[in-house]
Image (cartoon, grey):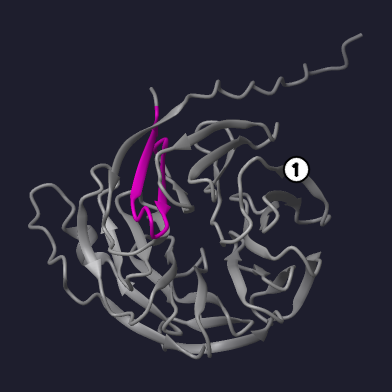
Amino acid sequence: MSSGAPQQQQAPPPPYRQYRQMRAATPHSRAVSCVRFSPCGRLLATASLDSTVALLSPSSLAVIATLRGHTDGVSDLSWSTDSLYLCTASDDRTLRIWDVRPILSRLNPGAQPADPNADRCIRVLKGHTNFVFSANFNPQTNTTVASGGFDGTVRIWDVNSGRCVRTIDAHSEPVTSVHFIRDGSIIVSGSHDGTCKIWDAMTGSCLKTVIDEKKPAVSFSMFSPNGKFILVATLDDSLKLCNFATGKFLKVYSGHVNRTYCIQSTFSVMNGKYIVSGSEDNCVYIWDLQGRNILQKLEGHSDTVISVSCHPTENKIASGGLDNDRTVRLWVQES
């Protein structure tokens, strides 16, 4: 006997469509360290060891503006949720906040292009005592930023005043990543000390230690878009998906090479659910999130792919390569 309403069948995932390289550009004179599409999808920001940040067209990869001001390499960048501000983390021990509004307003049809070399920096955040390696805007507000550095601290900053409002002695070795959950209440951090920890963003107290090994180093960590999972990279060629509530590891993604660098991976949730990462064999890897199998390996870079980013509304991946490559590449799914 049927007991009431029929069971809802979950729709099967869409068939995987191959990515192909659409474009390559060289906006920097040194290694690319980070690539990030803006949440609005209208800009692609790239950071480099040449101490600059470039704002590129996400379709042509033409340089729209160059942000200068850091005096040493830039390791990370983060967009505010409204795409109006950009935060950058540098080996010069500072973070900078850049106002992107004049650039965005000039992207409209018929508008005069913005001055590509104007000084857009509105804040310099000082306090770290060594390289700043990671930065992340609180997704709920463009007035709060978290950062992690080689001094072992995680710091919370008030963008309006430029002041550090909390310093957390988080790790015994360099902090490789900091990332807010989507409601902004907690932060995940990873470190070369082999630990991955969860912090209360208001109080700075440690809520949970997700990984507590001495080795391998945790090279990257981030919350999934829905906030239920944490993606953790370790320097033993491994990416793991952890259930945040239980602390249990659900999936391991492997096949790529990652022993040396802090490679930034990401989730792709536009057309099916994938994990995307760079690799030290100069490729971009795409895994099926559920099945853990490699769906595609994108070849084209001539050095380690250090960073990848998925476009928020289109089936596009951007990737950046280290010093022997220096390119930013755009990959699109075949329609």
| Amino acid at dot 1 | Lys
Q: Nearer the viewer, residue 288 or 137?
A: 288
Quarter containing the C terminus: top left
Q: Is residue 127 left or right of residue 73?
A: right
Quarter containing the N terminus: top right
Vertical order, 104 against 22 (above or below): below
Q: Is residue 286 left or right of residue 333?
A: right
How many neighbours does mark 1 have within 10 angstroms: few (below 14), some (14-19), or many (20 or more)? some
Q: Which residues are magenta?
A: 314-333
Q: Nearer the viewer, residue 95 or 322?
A: 322
Q: Nearer the viewer, residue 18 or 144?
A: 18
The image shows residue 236 at horizontal and vertical percentages of: 70, 55
**SS state under label 1:** strand
> Which residue is labeled 1 in the image?
251
Residue beneath the point at 79% across and 56% down: 245
The image shows residue 158 at horizontal and vertical percentages of: 48, 83
Residue beneath the point at 49% across and 42% down: 283
